[in-house]
Image (cartoon, rainbow, N blue to C red):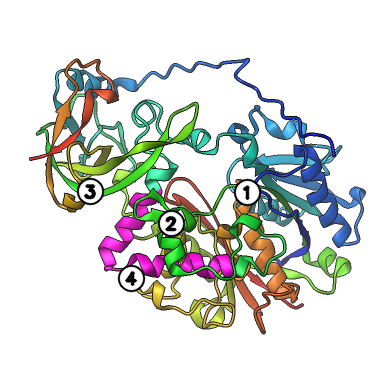
Amino acid sequence: MTEKIVVANKGLVRAEFAFWVGQYMDKFFDALENKKLIGNKCPKCNDVFVPPRKICGKCNITIPLDQNWIDLPETGIIKNYTITPYKINDRASRKVKKSQIIGMIQIDGSNTCIIYRLLDIDPEDIKIGMKVKVEWEEKTNGDPSDIKGFTKI
Amino acid sequence: MQRVGIVGYNQVKLYSDANYGRYEMIFEAVRGAIDSAGLKKKDITTVISCTNDYYEGRTISNCFTVEVGGGYMADESKVEMDGAHAVLYGLMRILSGNHKLAVIWGGSMASCFPYHSARLYETDPTWERPVAYVNDISSAGFQMRAYLQKYGVNNEDIAKIAVKNRKNASKNPLALEEAKNPNITIKDVLESGIYADPVTELMVAQPCDGVAALLLAPEKQALKITDNPVWITGVGYSQDTYYLGDRDLSGSKSMEVASKMAFNAAGIKDPKSEINVAELFEAYAHEEIIFSEAIGFAEKGKGAELNTEIDGEIPINPSGGAIGGNPPCGTGLIRIIEAAKQLRGEANGYQVKNARKAIASGQIGMCAQNNILFVLEGGN
């Protein structure tokens, strides 16, 4: 049998996408840049969303852009977590030496969870319901990476 | 619902790195299905394929698979979800009254693309993807922990499912060799290395290479083609909201809705006593338990207490399930084929006795956002 020939396409064509985040996320990212968290509230079911959104999917209605914004604290609770040695980006998935702890955090005053790393917490110490707070990147850019992660209070 | 019959099927053996070109594998699956029913290319009136452009590395990927999939000069279309969704599309084509024979095929070669990176493209590009903490691996960990936490279930109970499916897979000649292990223990599963805690490596349905094909025909044609058709008597389909942080991951609401819909159509009132065998697309061991509860085989939190062995009270995944091999875009279709095999008495080596009614499910999305369930009945 002849040797298996593999043709690998290392991106001869690179399609770079540019996504406009929309007016609601624009406001949210502006807040992140100032190290603040905001959400918005569905006028019908009163759920508070972080990040904010234009439409409440369950109620199927629009949340007006100029209404129902809520300033939120930088504290929340751990609702769920996982620990994984796999690191994934858009080029590769690989196993790293130091596992990341990734948590689902419900910001106080909101009804949804956001997913970020848990920093400086030993896996044995993590408890569901534990209080945590945002650790900001020193220099913020108005994007999802402004939140470095969450730390124990 | 007018009766639509499964009149033929074929699946190529699953490999972690198959020695096939892409198109050879599709041709072997589809041609084999047509041959198994004693039919010819000219009998095909519609072809529905299931692939994913990100997994194929090209856009409108079905334009390259027309000939090998039996679609030359035929009505041809694609579903970019799970193979089980392609069966729903094929079913609708038949029910339209315009078609006499539908070929449905699905699958891919996971050895040819970076699976987890490709799945990262499911995430929100404006919020989650830039930091990549939400991905198919971390979501598996969240889902299992949500279930364990809510019901106080042990890791051992989840590992048991992986043990059962890997033992079952060793009886299935078409399953992935790497997934088979007749002597595996709960300890082996628990000590197989962390995937996304509490999920361990051997609890995962490993993405692999494979293609499967299925033939559907309306009742009249089905009875002409075979004296052993399998009827689709119900189907249900539902999806949950996208963001993981909005969902209750400890259960599967979309599977609850999908199964109710399917059981209503099929006139099934008590699934546990009426269904003889289930083939469920469990991307991870814990999903099999979550689904079996959503379907109504057990109360919430009690799924692990069911005996789901081949000779158990309700056999689930006698073929080894998705843990026995998980070719993206083909896995749900294979579940339907495996359920049909059981009803036709063709599951050599893992046949469930007296199987008259079966269910088969497909899914797609992080934490099985979207679920589809079929009810199948044997005999004519």
Q: Are marks 3 and 1 on the same chain?
A: no
Is the same chain shared between marks 4 and 3? no
Range of residues picked out in magenta: B140-167
Determine whether the residue tagged by mark 2 lies in a helix, strand or loop.
helix
Q: CA distance from mark 4 to mark 3?
A: 25 Å
Residue B359 position, x and y percent, is 58, 69
Q: Is residue B276 magenta?
A: no
Can residue A24 be seen?
no
Mark 4 chain: B
- Figure check: B265 above or below B249: below
Mark 2 → mark 3, Cα distance in angstroms: 32 Å
Say whether disc 2 or disc 4 marks the residue closer to the N-terminus. 2
What predominant SS class does the magenta segment belong to?
helix
Which callout, 1 or 2, points to the residue nearer the camera?
1
Along the viewing direction, whichever of A94 and B300 lies nearer the viewer: A94
Identify residue for label 2.
Answer: B254
Chain of the residue under the numbered disc 2 shown in the image:
B
Residue for point 66% across, 27% down: B58
Of tags 4 and 3, which is closer to the observer?
Answer: 3
Residue A133: quarter of image: top left
Chain ID of residue with mark 3: A
Q: CA distance from mark 2 to mark 4?
A: 17 Å
In this view, the mark in front (1 or 4) = 1
User: Which residue occupies 72% across, 72% down?
Assistant: B347
Kindly identify the residue that appears in the image at 69 percent across and 48 percent down: B210
* Residue A123, label in figure: 3
Instruction: Name the quarter where the N terminus of chain B is drawn.
Output: bottom right
Residue at the spot of label 4: B301
Disc 1 or 2, which lies upstream in sequence? 2
